[in-house]
Amino acid sequence: MRLLDLLRKSTESLEAAGIEDALPDAEMIVLHALGMERLDAYVNNPEMRKADAAKIKRLIQRRRKGEPVQYLTGIVAFLGLTVQVGKGVLIPRPETELLVEEVIKTIKSEELGARSQDKPAGAASCDSRLTPYASLSVLDLCTGSGCIALALAKEFPDADVYGTDVSKEALAYARKNAKINSIQNATFLEGSLFVPVNDRKFNIITANPPYIRRDELDTLQREIRDWEPLDALDGGEDGMDFYRQILSSAGEYLGPGGCIFLELGFDQAGFVQKLAQEQGFRDVAIINDYAGIGRILEARKEKFPSNKPN
């Protein structure tokens, strides 16, 4: 049997099992199993060895049962990074790439990375786009696979980037992903939210926290419900538990004028925006994704303590 015949049969098998993206999933599985580029596969259409065909058949059977294709291949592309994933770690989504892009845009457009506590009085301000961002510090909460932290660490290699998570399994993937991508300025710490960083201050705080309402977990598509870690999805009764915890404490960990970026659930923008305002953040903005959904919250800490009466 030739490769394209096997690909056709694999696609038909996934279609029969109700897999929505049968062809792209079959392609990813077949090409991964063979270690082959897509163009080579379609141009050369090699004869399949029995061992390779059997391996692909086993992977297709696992996909038929709902196992995510990213767990089968073990990797996800994320903003130029190769991110390893597997059972126990949330699969990075395109919406999260938008969050990282917004953070990078903010850092490069303002002098967050160029500021230094040691800068002498009267020194000229540097164009932040030309500096090595040596004074920039970033904290990524609920870091999971480390995709946010690592993408920012790669973009700003002289910055100090930290990621925290309660999951040992997720942190193992994050540390492995740092090595795979040759990133040395990211540190991953075990613990809940801000606990592992003590009283350290950051220029930027990011998070893609659990935000699914608990009574909606059973309604998720089976690839998510039956395979991805529910602890990384469960946002409590109303989906807002982590937003409350993060925004009530974030001000203590941000330096003056620092920014926080949060990924949001489908209908949560208004609530989280109000919550940030109530916690004293300014310049609170909601950034829409490509479908027009309010997906990212950006907010800034006051540069100086407020003089408002209590």
Image (spheres, rainbow, N blue to C red):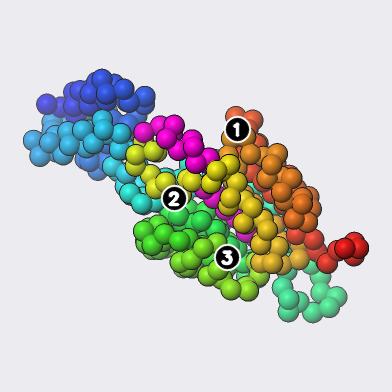
Examine the structure image and report whether residue 211 is included in the region drawn in magenta.
Answer: yes
Is the C-beta separation of discs 2 and 1 under 8 Å? no
- Give 300 or 225, whichever is nearer the viewer: 225
**Please, which residue is most extreme toward the left here?**
50
Mark with earlier residue (2, 1): 2
Q: Residue at x 53, y 40 (%)?
A: 213
- The residue where tag 3 is placed is 194
Which amino acid lies under the numbered mark 2 shown in the image of this protein?
Asp
Closest to the camera, between mark 1 and mark 3, is 3
User: Around disc 1, counting alpha carbons within 10 Å, would you say few (fewer than 14), some (14 to 19), or many (20 or more)?
Assistant: few
Q: How far apart are marks 3 and 2 (CA)?
A: 18 Å
Which amino acid lies under the numbered mark 1 shown in the image of this protein?
Tyr
Q: Is mark 3 on a helix, strand or loop?
A: loop
Which mark, by number, is residue 231?
2
- Give 212 or 172, whichever is nearer the viewer: 212
- Give 128 or 309, whichever is nearer the viewer: 309
Q: How far apart are marks 1 and 3 (CA)?
A: 31 Å
Is the C-beta separation of discs 1 and 3 under 8 Å? no
Find residue 286 and report its horizontal and vertical position in percent. Answer: 70, 41
User: Is 162 situated above or below 62?
Assistant: below
> Which span is picked out in magenta?
203-222
Closest to the camera, between mark 2 and mark 1, is 2
User: Around disc 2, counting alpha carbons within 10 Å, would you say few (fewer than 14), some (14 to 19), or many (20 or more)?
Assistant: few
Which mark, by number, is residue 290?
1
Q: Is mark 2 on a helix, strand or loop?
A: helix
Number of numbered labels in the structure image: 3
Q: Quadrant location of the N terminus?
A: top left
User: Around disc 3, counting alpha carbons within 10 Å, would you say few (fewer than 14), some (14 to 19), or many (20 or more)?
Assistant: many
